[in-house]
Amino acid sequence: MKVGVLKIGSTTVSWLLAEDLSRPLTRRQAVLNLIDRPDAESILGTLVESWLDQTGPRADMVLVGGGQALRQHPEWVEHLGLASWILSGAEEGQVARIGILAMAKHDAGMVIDIGGGSTEIVDNHRSYSLPVGVRRPISDQSSALSWPSRAPSAAATIVGGAGQAVARLLQRSDVDAIATEELEQLRRRIQNRLPQWFEHHGIPADRISLVRPGIDILAAMLSHYHINRFYCSPYGLLEGLWLAASLGQGRPYPNARLDRFSPV
């Protein structure tokens, strides 16, 4: 069965069509920065229609899912005519961790999912959502944050565009551990860099403004939880949503309600 998943985030929108998660048929991403756009619903509808026209007919089932952006703007998905799952903050972190565990080649440890409007922290036991993201900078709110208490963890896995930017700038794959000292060195190195420098190092122009706030959030998280190394995973919520959809349920946890999806 071919399953399509559309993940709508504050910053990016992603589409994954696959019959087997390890061999995607189609994978696309667009940086839209929806929270900042007065025409967000219109531009999102146009993009989704275009993607589905091109690849949607190949899918037996399609799920639209997302976290903070859809919690703030559920109307964005109401008119798409597709099965949707607006995740709570805790669910967002849990589903992202499922996607990582399905694909990772190492122990995921604590998972930190840095998004545009929220950041999720999740491990084997619980999941928390903090109201900071690359579009809600931590520098303005860190002193007032209610940091969740966590069990000690030597390593973490970072999900989202911030992690991918770090991996690209440091030329690391998802199986390479990165020391927190290297992240601090990178923070100092990029302080006064011009946009052309980031583009030269493989950061798309529409993501450059998000790199510094993302790294600031990551550094604050690692420091607060005394984590000395981390991995940057290209997998996460999109893959977790695909796994949930492929199982025919919208709530992958036994203590939660199960939602059945309707075929497209």
Image (cartoon, helix red, strand yellow):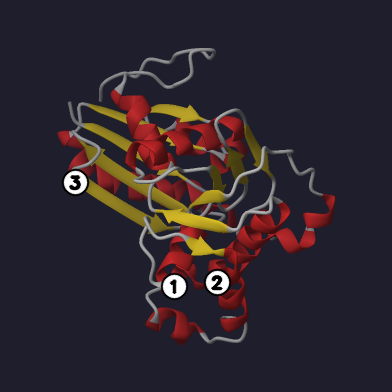
User: Which residue in the structure is indicated by mark 1?
Assistant: 170
Image marks 2 and 1: residues in contact by CB distance under 8 Å: yes
Splitting the image into 4 quarters, where does residue 204 fall? bottom left
Residue behind mark 3: 54
The residue under label 3 is which amino acid type? Gln
Residue 205 percent coordinates (x, y)? 43, 74
Q: Is 73 on the left or on the right of 178, as rendered?
A: right
Give the residue displayed 43% in from the left and 65% down from the top: 167
Element under disc 1: helix
Three-letter amino acid code of the residue under disc 1: Leu
The answer to which of 172 and 20 lies nearer the viewer is 172
The C terminus sits in image quarter: top left
- State which quadrant residue 203 falls in: bottom left
| Residue 182: mark | 2
* 149 on left or right of 14: right
For marks 2 and 1 on the same chain, the one whose residue lies earlier in the sequence: 1
Q: Position of residue 127 (x, y in %)?
A: 61, 33
Q: CA distance from mark 2 to mark 1?
A: 8 Å
Query: Which residue is rendered at x = 43% and y = 28% of the image?
Result: 84
Q: Position of residue 34 (x, y in %)?
A: 52, 53
**Amino acid on which the number 2 mark rests in the picture:** Glu
